[in-house]
Image (cartoon, rainbow, N blue to C red):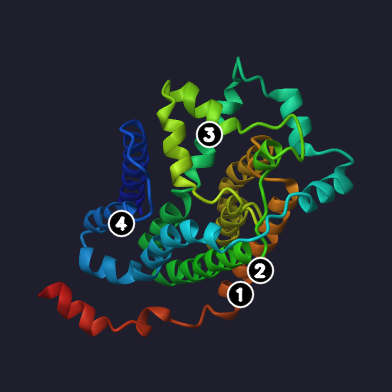
């Protein structure tokens, strides 16, 4: 177990350092580039060929995400701006993003939580891969349940973005639907790296600014939390502070409304229940033609 923990820690450290270096050098962090990270993860556990076969569904989700997120805006004809605003106002009698930024955001003197929030926001892109790698080291059936849930959740999110394209608070503010809301991450990234081009790199990573509902940050982090509680019991609560902090930050930073987060939580819960309690007996790993793949890898 100590050996597995060491390998997992080394893998996470590598991914964090690689991501920071790619951003610093002005390289776009795309899911396809993380394929090389996954391959090196297989080398760490000394089972690279088996690792590739086991991770094919996860890799497919990452690669297709890179394609679909750029395709979705071209399929959209009407953007929803006002529904989430009204729903948040009915829930709180205020707009939480507006209120939080008015109270806590100071563009000229960023606070510690602006920097910390940027870190937890971008760690989200590593979270499902890291958690999947941990499960892979422990038990493959855990890993398969999680990847099933993650895959279904991801594609449900893509479909929702097509059927119901919704603008985030900062986009709504730029369009004049609300006031007093800014994109906090732009300020945080520029302050952290001291370079304006890093902001452009971040925007190039997110070509779909109208994919607000559901919040995939909320949905995926909640999915991870639920699986962590399922597999690790009370130890899974160690994920909870990160999840709650992430939900708060995406609302504060103008990336999502509370409505988006709530819908994301519902999505995460639904696909957790579907994959953990209804589809867990399906061994999708054997639906792939493993014999041909193995022969090809051995060639």
Q: Quadrant of residue 193?
A: top left
Q: Is residue 284 above or below residue 14?
A: below
* Label 1: element kind: helix
Q: Which residue is mark 4?
A: 35
In the picture, the disc for residue 274 is 1
Q: CA distance from mark 2 to mark 3?
A: 28 Å
Q: Earlier in the sequence, mark 4 or mark 1?
A: 4
Q: CA distance from mark 4 to mark 1?
A: 27 Å
Cβ atoms under marks 1 and 2 closer than 8 Å: yes
Q: Quadrant of the N terminus?
A: bottom left
Q: How far from the left and from the top, in percent, is residue 92?
A: 86, 42
**Residue sitting at x 78%, y 49%:** 82
Q: CA distance from mark 3 to mark 1?
A: 32 Å
* Label 4: element kind: helix
**Residue sitting at x 59%, y 80%:** 278
Q: Report the front residue among 157 and 127.
A: 157
Q: CA distance from mark 4 to mark 3?
A: 24 Å
């Amino acid at each position: 177990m100590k050996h597995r923990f060491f390998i997992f820690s080394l893998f996470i450290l590598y991914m964090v350092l690689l991501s920071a270096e790619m951003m610093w050098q002005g390289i776009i962090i795309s899911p396809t580039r993380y394929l090389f990270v996954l391959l090196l993860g297989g080398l760490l556990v000394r089972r690279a060929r088996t690792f590739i076969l086991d991770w094919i569904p996860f890799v497919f989700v990452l690669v297709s995400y890179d394609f679909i997120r750029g395709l979705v805006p071209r399929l959209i004809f009407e953007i929803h701006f006002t529904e989430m605003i009204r729903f948040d106002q009915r829930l709180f009698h205020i707009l939480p993003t507006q209120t939080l930024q008015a109270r806590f955001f100071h563009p000229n003197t960023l606070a510690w939580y602006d920097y910390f929030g940027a870190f937890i926001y971008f760690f989200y892109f590593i979270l499902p891969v890291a958690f999947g790698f941990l499960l892979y080291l422990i038990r493959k059936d855990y890993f398969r349940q999680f990847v099933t849930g993650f895959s279904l959740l991801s594609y449900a999110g893509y479909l929702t973005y097509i059927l119901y394209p919704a603008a985030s608070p900062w986009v709504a503010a730029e369009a004049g639907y609300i006031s007093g809301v800014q994109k906090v991450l732009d300020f945080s990234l520029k302050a952290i790296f001291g370079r304006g081009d890093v902001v452009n790199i971040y925007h190039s990573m997110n070509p779909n600014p109208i994919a607000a509902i559901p919040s995939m940050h909320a949905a995926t982090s909640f999915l991870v939390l639920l699986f962590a509680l399922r597999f690790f019991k009370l130890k899974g609560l160690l994920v909870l502070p990160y999840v709650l902090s992430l939900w708060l930050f995406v609302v504060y930073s103008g990336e999502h409304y509370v409505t988006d987060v709530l819908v994301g939580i519902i999505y995460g819960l639904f696909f957790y229940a579907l994959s953990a309690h209804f589809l867990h007996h399906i061994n999708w790993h054997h639906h792939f033609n493993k014999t041909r793949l193995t022969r090809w890898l051995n060639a």
